[in-house]
C-alpha cells in the first residue's frame, strides 16, 4: 500500500467517524426538542385533573356534603372509593 492509498483510507475513516458523530448529535438534539412537548402535555393533564377535582368538590357541596376519598388497606387490598360525605 502506498502512502497515497494509506492517506485515502485514513481520510475515509475520519470522514465516517465525523458523520457518525454528527448523526449522534442530531439524535440527541431531537430528544431534547421533544421534551418541551412532554412538559406541555403534563401541564394540560394537571389542569384537567384539577378541573375534575374542582367539579367533584362543587358537586358534593351542592349535595350538602364534602368530598371523601377512602384508600383500601395495604394488607387486604380493595378499591379506592370517592364519594360525598355529609
Image (cartoon, rainbow, N blue to C red):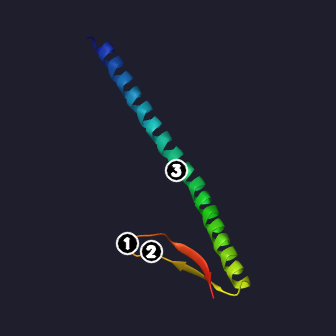
Tell which of 23 and 59 is nearer to you: 59
Q: Quadrant of the N terminus?
A: top left
Which quadrant holds residue 76? bottom left
- Tags 2 and 1 touching, CB below 8 Å: yes
Which quadrant holds residue 61? bottom right
Residue holding disc 3: 32
Q: Residue at horizontal 38%, vertical 31%? A: 17
- Kindly report the distance in space between the C-alpha atoms of the residues bearing marks 1 and 3: 44 Å
- Kindly report the distance in space between the C-alpha atoms of the residues bearing marks 2 and 1: 8 Å
Q: Residue at horizontal 44%, vertical 70%? A: 78
Q: Residue at horizontal 35%, vertical 73%? A: 75
Which numbered marker is on residue 6? none
Q: Nearer the viewer, mark 3 or mark 2?
A: 2
Q: Earlier in the sequence, mark 3 or mark 2?
A: 3
Q: Earlier in the sequence, mark 1 or mark 3?
A: 3
Mark 2, other Cα within 10 Å: few <14 / some 14–19 / many ≥20:
few
Residue holding disc 1: 76
Q: Position of residue 37 (x, y in %)?
A: 60, 53
In the picture shown, does residue 23 fall above or below 37? above
Q: Nearer the viewer, mark 1 or mark 3?
A: 1
Q: Position of residue 68 (x, y in %)?
A: 57, 81
Q: Position of residue 58 (x, y in %)?
A: 71, 80
In the picture shown, does residue 21 fall above or below 8? below
SS class of the residue under badge 1? loop
- Tags 3 and 2 touching, CB below 8 Å: no
Which numbered marker is on residue 72? 2
Q: Position of residue 83 (x, y in %)?
A: 60, 77
In the picture shown, does residue 16 fall above or below 82? above
Tell which of 23 and 55 is nearer to you: 55
SS class of the residue under badge 3? helix
Amino acid at each position: 500500500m502506498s502512502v497515497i492509498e494509506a492517506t485515502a483510507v485514513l481520510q475515509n475513516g475520519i470522514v465516517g467517524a465525523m458523520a457518525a458523530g454528527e448523526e449522534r448529535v442530531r439524535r440527541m438534539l431531537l430528544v431534547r426538542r421533544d421534551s418541551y412537548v412532554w412538559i406541555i402535555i403534563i401541564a394540560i393533564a394537571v389542569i384537567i385533573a384539577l378541573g375534575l377535582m374542582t367539579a367533584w368538590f362543587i358537586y358534593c357541596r351542592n349535595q350538602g356534603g364534602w368530598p371523601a376519598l377512602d384508600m383500601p388497606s395495604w394488607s387486604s387490598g380493595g378499591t379506592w372509593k370517592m364519594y360525598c360525605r355529609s
